[in-house]
Amino acid sequence: MSFKTRWSLGAIAAAALLASPAFAQGDREARIYDYDDTGERAGILRDLNVSLMGGLNTYTGDIGGETGPGGFLGVQASSRPLPMVGLELGYEGSRNPFEDLDGGLWRHNVGALAKVGPELGADRNLRPFVGAGVGVSLLNPSGDGEILYDNDLVTEVPLAAGVEYNFGAITAGARATYRLVGGEDLGLAQDGNIVNFGLQVGGAF
């Protein structure tokens, strides 16, 4: 088992251990948390959120040596079913230019993220979090890079930390994500993880 695989499995296990007490606490809090006259938790529908995110994307390792900093855009759908636990599904696309070639390395990712963190403030609308998840990406070189590099399908384990804030029906936030990438082999570039920093804005309903 490779070092990177052990890292990925360890990250998933750590996320599960981190989330377990949060689910337990969330279950206890849910019994007293903002119930309306029907016995349903008030405001749960407002925790359904769709947001857009964009920011800076860069690679480490061999891939980082062949590419420069680039940008990414993404869209996420998220929910907070328990006071301390959030779940997120999303798509993220990025492009990093090759250093010595025309063209760039495109990445298309779909993934899921579990987020754990408290609800702070008088209205519980300030939400710092840490999170971990799983994803799959297609790495696709373009331009002259198509001659030297291959397409590659890889797995990812994103580890994220950030903060979100609700302005009524509008949400905004910022996060940093380190993505452990497994199985990459673009030919001349054999390995590299991903680091990105992003801002997001969306709507809750």
Image (spheres, rainbow, N blue to C red):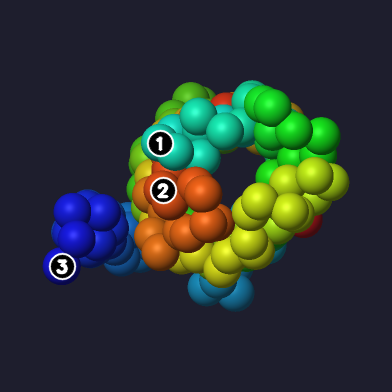
From the viewer's side, name the closer residue of 20 and 36: 20
Residue 199 visible in the snapshot: no
The residue identified by callout 2 is 191
- Of mark 2 and mark 1, the one earlier in the sequence is 1
* Residue at 51% across, 32% down: 64
Above or below, comparing residue 10 to residue 56 in the picture = below
- Which SS class for mark 3? loop
Label 3 Cα neighbours within 10 Å, binned few <14 / some 14-19 / many ≥20: few
| Image coords of residue 95 (percent x, y) | 73, 40
- What whole-number distance in Å separates the C-alpha atoms at marks 3 and 2? 16 Å
- What whole-number distance in Å separates the C-alpha atoms at marks 3 and 1? 19 Å
Point out the image quarter for the C terminus. Answer: bottom right
| Image coords of residue 10 (percent x, y) | 18, 57
- Of mark 3 and mark 2, the one earlier in the sequence is 3
The residue identified by callout 3 is 1
- Of mark 3 and mark 1, the one earlier in the sequence is 3
Number of numbered markers: 3
Question: Are the two marked residues, 2 and 1, in contact with CB atoms closer than 8 angstroms?
Answer: yes
User: In the drawing, what numbered circle is on residue 61?
Assistant: 1
Instruction: Inspect the image, locate mark 2, and give the three-letter code of the amino acid beneath it.
Output: Asp
User: In the drawing, what numbered circle is on residue 110?
Assistant: none
- Residue 63 as seen in the image, left or right of residue 89: left
Label 1 Cα neighbours within 10 Å, binned few <14 / some 14-19 / many ≥20: few
Above or below, comparing residue 85 to residue 171 in the picture = below
Quarter where residue 25 is shown? bottom left
- Which SS class for mark 2? loop
* Residue at 81% across, 39% down: 103
Question: Are the two marked residues, 3 and 1, in contact with CB atoms closer than 8 angstroms?
Answer: no
Instruction: Inspect the image, locate mark 1, and give the three-letter code of the amino acid beneath it.
Output: Gly
| Image coords of residue 158 (percent x, y) | 43, 50
* Residue at 40% across, 64% down: 183
